[in-house]
Image (tube, helix red, strand yellow):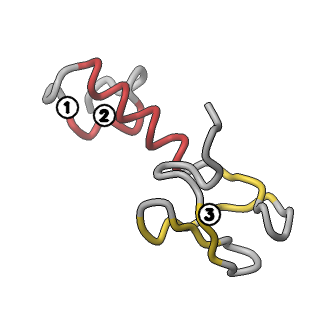
Amino acid sequence: MGRTKVVSIAGRFGARYGSSLRKKWRDVMLKRYEEYYCPLCGLKTEMERISVGVWRCGKCGRVFAGGAYQPISGLK
């Protein structure tokens, strides 16, 4: 088992692609799979990304536009 403490989800790439690229990819993926508040129903849930900028709420099932990697654009 390799050391994946620093890169966590990007540990599956091993020593490939360089450390800074793996860390940037990790940050994007962690934000993508976080739980967010639905702008339509107001409940905190896991959003499903249908395509780039199109999201579906896991609770109410409504589809709405958002950011490419986050359901609500403008978050950091």
| Residue to which mark 1 is pinned | 14
Foreground mark, 2 or 3, reads 3
Give the residue furthest to the left. 16
Q: CA distance from mark 3 to mark 1?
A: 28 Å
Residue 22, percent from left and from top: 29, 28
The residue at the far right in this view is: 42
Q: Give the secondary structure at mark 3.
A: loop
For label 1, the SS is loop
**Label number found at residue 47:** 3
* Mark 1 → mark 2, Cα distance in angstroms: 6 Å
Please report contact status of discs 3 and 1: CB closer than 8 Å, yes or no.
Answer: no
Left or right placement of residue 14 versus residue 63 in this view: left
In this figure, what is the number of numbered marks?
A: 3
Q: Quadrant of residue 75?
A: top right
Q: Earlier in the sequence, mark 2 or mark 3?
A: 2
Residue 9 percent location from the top left of the image: 39, 39
Left or right, 71 with reference to 4: right
Which amino acid is tagged 2? Gly
Q: Amino acid at mark 3?
A: Met
Q: Residue at x 73, y 62 (%)?
A: 45
Q: Are marks 2 and 3 in contact (CB under 8 Å)?
A: no
Looking at the rendered structure, the kind of residue marked 1 is: Gly
Q: Residues within 10 Å of mark 1 (few under 14, many from 20)?
A: some
CB under 8 Å between discs 1 and 2: yes
Say which element carries label 2.
Answer: helix
User: Which numbered disc flags the more N-terminal residue, 3 or 1?
Assistant: 1
